Amino acid sequence: MAQTSAKLESNAIVVGIDVSKDHLDAGQYPSGDLIQTSNDTKGIRTLLRWIGRQRAVYVVFEANLAVRL
């Protein structure tokens, strides 16, 4: 597992994104909010707007990143 030089603040908001060929699944910690979008330009735009509303401090992807743009 990757190590980071900085610890997360206690109030940190993290968005994790799981990438598949057809869709993107994202979840926010600690609220548990979830979203699924298509893995295309429209879906990525939707996901970026959603992330902006979450006021995310950190956004993480699975290690096997393959987003189509």
Image (tube, rainbow, N blue to C red):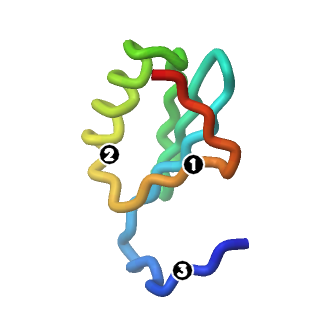
Which quarter of the figure has residue 12?
A: bottom left
Instruction: Please state, as top left, top right, bottom left or bottom right, where the C terminus lies in the image.
Output: top left
Please state which of the two labelled residues, at mark 1 or mark 2, is closer to the viewer. Answer: 1
Q: Residue at x 41, y 24 (%)?
A: 44
Q: Nearer the viewer, residue 6 or 68?
A: 68
Name the residue beneath numbered marker 1.
61
Which quarter of the figure has residue 58?
A: bottom left
- Identify the secondary structure beneath mark 3: loop
The kind of residue tagged 3 is Thr
Which quarter of the figure has residue 48?
A: top left
Disc 3 to disc 2, C-alpha distance: 22 Å
- Label 2 neighbour load within 10 Å: few <14, some 14-19, many 20+: some
Q: Which mark is residue 54?
A: 2
Q: Residue at x 53, y 23 (%)?
A: 68
Disc 1 to disc 2, C-alpha distance: 16 Å
Residue 39 lies, in percent from the top left, at 54, 19
Name the residue beneath numbered marker 3.
4
- Identify the secondary structure beneath mark 1: strand
Point out the tag, 1 or 2, that comes first from the N-terminus: 2
Disc 3 to disc 1, C-alpha distance: 15 Å
The kind of residue tagged 1 is Phe
The kind of residue tagged 2 is Gln
- Check contact, mark 1 vs mark 2: CB within 8 A: no
Residue 14 lies, in percent from the top left, at 45, 57
Instruction: Please state, as top left, top right, bottom left or bottom right, where the N terminus lies in the image.
Output: bottom right
Point out the tag, 3 or 1, that comes first from the N-terminus: 3
- Label 3 neighbour load within 10 Å: few <14, some 14-19, many 20+: few
